[in-house]
């Protein structure tokens, strides 16, 4: 097959303009306008607001490419558009070859008859997604409940109509409570011209049938597209070695051919933390008259089950991987940029690296974004990160007319087929929060208010999409994977509860519940919960100016999209902390607050295993610089939360906590082996004096959570000075401390924090720098930065106890001299008014 990229020499222009400018493909109108200096950076200050005209216009993209006779003489020639966003007509040499209307689909068009030797012209006309949406909205006659995240007002859409649901385009483009509103258009994934004779491999699926210690059995399902009735030799190889071969008589058109094969002594693929991520490269070769077509897939041999069994409390919901029940530790994942086409390989690598180093084993690709690039899933396969994959539906009721359903069916087909060979994909989920909103957020009532007929139509559309079209697509294209119709829910059409399924818990945040409730409001699987913070100061400086440095300034408010954001952060902050003395201190305390808050959830959920078997906080990343629930900001700077997540998800967790009137200590062991260790508990005052201690030898069962210490709080605190003391717990194996944690008895504002003298020594190591930090008395939440310079500290926001010295690593390109010039250290005691 000849494959030619059609990603160069593109130009774009507003429709009806003669002003053609160079364009990037993959790309979009906004990034092309930025590149051509026609608009300013949409993320800077309030610029976004001035760019709302772009989505009301139609845009043209065009390019030319040369073809020679060699290509043209091929039997078949197609153009393969991997992604068009969204309403397009495609013209080849002035003839219309395609009309498309779904950003998530892949479009392949037969083009041989339109092509010629020499120059060929390709032109794509993008119609405004807003104008198209308005037409559909107006024709509909009633309003679908939901889509509250669609910032139609900011978008200056006629009548503030929320039109997003009518278009199969990433929901977050229209705005979200952590996102800007920038509704772009463009060729967002690559374009290829493909030409071949005889036959080609249309698709290759490797289905794992059975696996035991000695052997794994598979079926390779080849979809072959043949121009003629011909004989073909098909061979399946593993790393170049033949596994099975056969001769088949190809039929004309697209047909499936199945070959069974075995792999002996299979090496399993494990989620991170439980074993290696062994991967096999399986190749299919099709030989027709000496012409060879190839396709390969990288697979992992593993079983993933979602176990839903009745027990004394309700119905379980947990992932069993290779027969082992695995507690899922992870986060929700959103797109890394409002403009998907500019997300770099490095950015994706960094998110997955962050997930992996933070001891995660699952990410949830949330339904308001897009089905991620292949690279994302490749990286997850390599890192052992399982993927909870939503279909792209979130927080809105959607239309259910036949065209729309057909479109969704094909979207599901394209994406399931593209992704199903990845070992990382653990489950397919229909939507985000639609079922719960219909039942609990007043949407059902909103529909009813428009009449019984409207109400039943809206629900029918829901049931058609999530109980029919999508599960059928999973059954047809990826039958071994589990389908879950909505997150959160307790089963198909069954709203969430705490005993049967997954739950999103927003009582902390929306309900202003105390952080402690994270440890009591626990479902079988916690697939969302979160708390906001602003970006790092270094990141704020990239989008705001000093005069904006106030969370209530126009600029900062515009980079805060939660309707209750600032007041809620302040509410929680002032419960536990005094007022920070300035803006930068506010950001720092906000980061500590977010991290300390979420710590209750990370530890509480894990302590509740095996009742609860998953904890995915909202959210690991950002799509622009904004106050959000993220643990890393848009520039991929780690907030305090990311460091706390890393610790909270350590395979061995020692967790002291207060519950009802008791103080307790649990140990959670994710390892698949029993561990014998010494548990050392000490109450220290802030100058390091030990006032109480207890040491026990304990045996920690594999894959378990168990309480090893409990005492009535009142008696434990008797004769203590809770405002000047803390509990330090350590697990020791031999000489090594394998887990450690602290518990304070009072909110920070009531602690008598001393003024520490913190000293640090920086030494150049082999690859990076080592920093040794020590303090005479307790130094709380030590935070190191390099100002505006780049660098990564292996730990941050940690407490240095009196007399203790802590070693951390610093990766940076800076020299020792440069580091010394810019490094800053902050502690909590000096942060308040
Ligand atoms: C969850 C998500 C998102 C939202 C987030 C924060 O419910 O599913 O829709 O952005 O909460 O409000």
Image (spheres, rainbow, N blue to C red):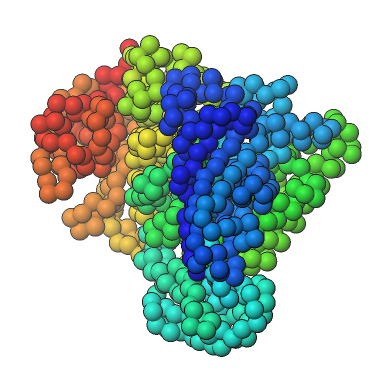
User: In this rendering, would 211 be left or right of 588?
Assistant: right
Which quadrant of the figure has residue 434? top right
Question: Does residue 323 lie above or below 48 as drawn?
Answer: below
The residue located at (56%, 84%) in the rendering is 232
Q: Would residue 743 be visible to someone looking at this image?
A: no
Left or right of 377: which side holds 821?
Answer: left
| Quadrant location, the C terminus | top left
Tell me residue 198's x, y (percent): 58, 76
Seen from the viewer's position, the closer of residues 250 and 409 is: 250
- On the image, the x and y values in percent for residue 517 come to 52, 36
- Residue 141 as seen in the image, left or right of residue 69: right
Q: How many marks?
A: 0
Front position in the image: 30 or 198: 198
Q: Residue drawn 55% across and 68% down?
A: 73
Using the rendered image of the protein, determine whether residue 680 is visible from the camera's viewpoint: yes
In this view, 173 is above or below 362: above
Q: Above or below — where is 229 with respect to 818?
A: below
Quarter of the rendering containing residue 159: top right
User: Would residue 754 be found to the left or right of residue 208 on screen?
Assistant: left
Q: Position of residue 732 (x, y in %)?
A: 25, 53
Q: Residue at x 52, y 52 (%)?
A: 119
Q: Nearer the viewer, residue 413 or 86?
A: 86
x then y, percent, for residue 696: 29, 53
**Residue at 89% across, 33% down:** 451
Residue situated in front as seen by the camera: 369 or 274: 369
């Amino acid at each position: 097959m000849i494959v030619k990229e059609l990603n160069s020499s593109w130009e774009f222009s507003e429709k009806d303009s003669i002003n053609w400018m160079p364009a990037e493909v993959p790309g979009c109108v906004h990034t092309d306008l930025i590149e051509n200096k026609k608009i300013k950076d949409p993320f800077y200050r309030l610029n976004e607001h001035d760019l709302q005209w772009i989505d009301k216009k139609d845009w043209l993209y065009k390019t030319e490419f040369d073809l020679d006779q060699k290509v043209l003489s091929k039997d078949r020639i197609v153009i393969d558009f991997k992604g068009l966003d969204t309403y397009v007509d495609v013209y080849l040499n002035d003839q219309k070859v395609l009309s498309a209307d779904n950003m998530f689909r892949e479009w392949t068009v037969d083009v041989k008859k339109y092509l010629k030797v020499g120059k060929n012209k390709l032109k794509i006309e993008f119609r405004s997604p807003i104008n198209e949406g308005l037409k559909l909205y107006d024709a509909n006659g009633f309003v679908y409940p939901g889509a509250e995240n669609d910032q139609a007002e900011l978008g200056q859409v006629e009548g503030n109509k929320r039109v997003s649901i009518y278009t199969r385009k990433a929901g977050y483009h229209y705005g979200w409570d952590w996102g800007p509103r920038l509704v772009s258009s463009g060729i967002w994934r690559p374009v290829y011209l493909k030409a071949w004779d005889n036959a080609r491999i249309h698709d290759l699926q490797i289905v794992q049938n059975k696996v035991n210690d000695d052997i794994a059995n598979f079926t390779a399902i080849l979809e072959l597209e043949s121009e003629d009735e011909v004989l073909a030799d098909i061979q399946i190889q593993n790393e170049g070695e033949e596994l099975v071969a056969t001769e088949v008589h190809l039929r004309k058109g697209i047909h499936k051919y199945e070959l069974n094969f075995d792999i002996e002594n299979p090496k399993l693929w494990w989620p991170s933390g439980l074993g290696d991520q062994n991967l096999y490269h399986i190749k299919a070769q099709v030989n027709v008259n000496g012409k060879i077509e190839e396709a390969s897939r990288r697979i992992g041999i593993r079983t993933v089950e979602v176990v839903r069994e009745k027990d004394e409390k309700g119905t379980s919901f947990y992932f069993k991987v290779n027969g082992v029940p695995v507690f899922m530790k992870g986060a929700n994942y959103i797109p890394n940029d409002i403009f998907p086409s500019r997300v770099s390989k490095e950015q994706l690598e960094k998110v997955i690296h962050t997930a992996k180093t933070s001891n995660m084993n699952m990410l949830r690709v949330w339904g308001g974004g897009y089905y991620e690039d292949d690279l994302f899933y490749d990286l997850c396969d390599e890192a052992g990160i399982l993927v909870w994959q939503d279909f792209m539906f979130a927080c809105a009721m959607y239309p259910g007319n036949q065209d729309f359903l057909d479109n969704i069916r094909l979207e599901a087909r394209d994406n399931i087929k593209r992704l199903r060979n990845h070992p990382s994909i653990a489950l397919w989920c229909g939507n985000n929060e639609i079922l719960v909103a219909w039942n609990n957020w007043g949407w059902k009532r909103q529909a009813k208010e428009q009449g019984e007929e409207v109400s039943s139509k809206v629900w029918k559309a829901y049931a058609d999409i999530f109980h029919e079209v999508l599960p059928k697509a999973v059954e047809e294209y990826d039958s071994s994977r589990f389908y879950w119709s909505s997150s959160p829910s307790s089963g198909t059409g069954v709203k969430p509860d705490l005993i049967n399924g997954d739950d999103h818990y927003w009582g902390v945040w929306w309900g202003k519940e105390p952080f402690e409730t994270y440890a009591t409001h626990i479902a079988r699987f916690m697939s969302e919960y979160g708390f906001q913070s602003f970006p790092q100061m270094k990141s704020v400086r990239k989008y705001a100016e000093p005069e904006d440095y106030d969370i209530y300034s126009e600029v900062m408010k515009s980079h805060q999209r939660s309707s209750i954001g600032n007041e809620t952060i302040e509410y929680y902050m002032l419960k536990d902390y005094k007022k920070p003395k300035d803006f930068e201190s506010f950001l720092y305390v906000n980061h500590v607050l977010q991290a300390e808050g979420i710590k209750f959830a990370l530890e509480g959920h894990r302590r509740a295993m095996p009742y609860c078997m998953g904890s995915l906080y909202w959210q690991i990343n950002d799509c622009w610089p904004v106050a959000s629930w993220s643990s890393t900001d848009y520039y991929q700077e780690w907030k305090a939360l990311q460091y706390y997540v890393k610790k909270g998800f350590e395979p061995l967790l020692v967790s002291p906590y207060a519950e009802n009137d008791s103080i307790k200590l649990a140990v959670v062991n994710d390892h698949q082996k029993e561990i014998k260790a010494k548990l050392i508990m000490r109450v220290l005052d802030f100058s390091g004096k030990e006032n109480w201690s207890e040491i026990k030898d304990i045996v920690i069962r594999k894959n378990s959570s168990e309480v090893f210490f409990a005492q009535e709080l009142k008696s434990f605190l008797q004769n203590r000075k809770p405002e000047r003391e803390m509990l330090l717990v350590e697990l020791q194996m031999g000489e090594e401390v394998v887990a450690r944690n602290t518990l304070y008895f009072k909110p920070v504002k009531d602690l008598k924090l001393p003024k520490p003298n913190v000293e640090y020594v920086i030494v150049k190591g082999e690859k990076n720098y080592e920093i040794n930090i020590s303090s005479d008395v307790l130094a709380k939440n030590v935070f190191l930065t390099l100002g505006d310079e780049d660098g990564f500290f292996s730990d941050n926001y940690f407490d240095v106890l009196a007399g203790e010295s802590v070693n951390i690593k610093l990766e940076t390109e800076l020299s020792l001299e440069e580091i010394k010039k810019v490094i800053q250290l902050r502690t909590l005691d000096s942060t308040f008014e």
